[in-house]
Amino acid sequence: MGMRRKLRTAGYWLCCLLLTMTLGLLLSAFHMPIGWLIAALASAGCIAVLAGREFVPHKLLLRPAQGCIGMAVALPLSGLASTTIAGYLGISAVCSAATLILCLVCGLALTRAAKTLSPATALLSTLAGGASGICTMAPELRVDHRYVALSQYLRVVVVALTVPLVLQCVGAPAARSHPTGSHVTLVSSAAAIVVIVAAGYAGLKWKWPAPFLIAPMLVALVTQLPGPGQFVLALPPALNAVAYVVIGWQAGGALTLGALRQCLRLLPLTCAFIAVAIAGCLVLTFVVSAWTGVSFSQAYLATTPGGIYVALAASDSAAEPLVATMQVLRLLVMNIAAIIGSKLLTTHKDSRPEGPREDPGLPAGLRAGVGRPWRLVRAGRSTSPAFDDRQRRLLSACATASPPAIAPAADTAWNSTRVM
């Protein structure tokens, strides 16, 4: 039986791999940003829903993939002088703070509108930026990571599809091709792998959230600050593509039919908040254009709610430092906000008293002695129309007994398996 299950699982993974390669090549032919991630998410999601079980990659694959995503965050800043980055920090901080406030408002509204979502889940699903990082750390932050992943990647797809339309409407030139892998050498790749392993396990020892994502990201950002000519930590594009595939499998492989129904039910709300985020960033575009003097199209690329690689691919050489600085800083702010916000919201939820609630019609001795088993009885009674006579007789006996004599009997009689 065990061997049959292993063979069935291997067959599912093989189908997932073939479907991922097919969709990935198709999306790459259409120059879809993070096409391999979207292909892996869709493929793993289809297999998981059809098979009726989850398919999550092993941590030996997830941890290096998280490190690769973290290292890739700082790559847009390579080659930029520290004085250039510092000159754009003011406008970047203002726009990042404004975008974060807008996301917090959207998260609060989503919590009120969708009663099934926790505040932490609503916050992570509406943060505009750092979709790969947020979805990678979501399973470790006690949120509904399935809805977070689908909403975040839906926003990325919408932004990627609307950027060419916006540029065409304002008469901007077509996107130029950027050289890929220009900073990659054998030494830089080896150094990046060492940083991922060392920083990741250091963050794990220090009990950081998502240590293999955050720790390499911070190390990579620090190494890019001195300016052009410094040593660049970079990985081959093919290795980054594999990392995106693993992250996509993590997000899509956790899908279930119930989670998919919930996401479809919340799809109008999700699309509405994505539209609000895009509209808010369009307002910020006027501020950036007036502050820096760049064209409207380049200012919009600097403020898009996500899609950093789409924005960099469409930016011109003059505005690329502005676009890179604003996008990277906003991405970093959103990842930090996801960690802090989810911790605060889940801690606030867990800090509420969970003690036994008193029933006005229950004798005081029974309330003191039964505790949690009585709550199980109430749960069983509220869901089952038949509350048998034996349970009624035992309740009557417990009502007249002393509290020390009740607890052992309650622990034996009120077995959760029997009640539920």
Image (spheres, rainbow, N blue to C red):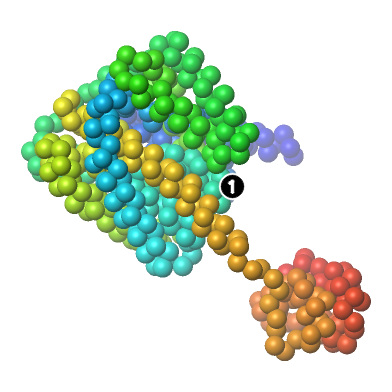
Total marks placed = 1
Q: On the image, which quarter does residue 92 sit in? A: top left
- Write the residue at 49% across / 61% down: 118
**Percent x, y for residue 341?**
47, 52
**Percent x, y for residue 45?**
48, 44
Q: Quadrant of the N terminus?
A: top right
Q: Is residue 82 visible?
A: yes
**Percent x, y for residue 58?**
60, 34
Q: Is residue 54 above or below residue 391?
A: above
Q: Amino acid at mark 1?
A: Arg
Residue located farthest toward the bottom when viewing the structure as drawn:
361
Frontmost residue, 34 versus 184: 184
- Write the residue at 42% across / 19% down: 233
For residue 263, side relative to residue 407 (left or right): left
The residue that label 1 is drawn on is 53
For residue 349, side relative to residue 402 (left or right): left
Residue located farthest toward the top when viewing the structure as drawn:
186
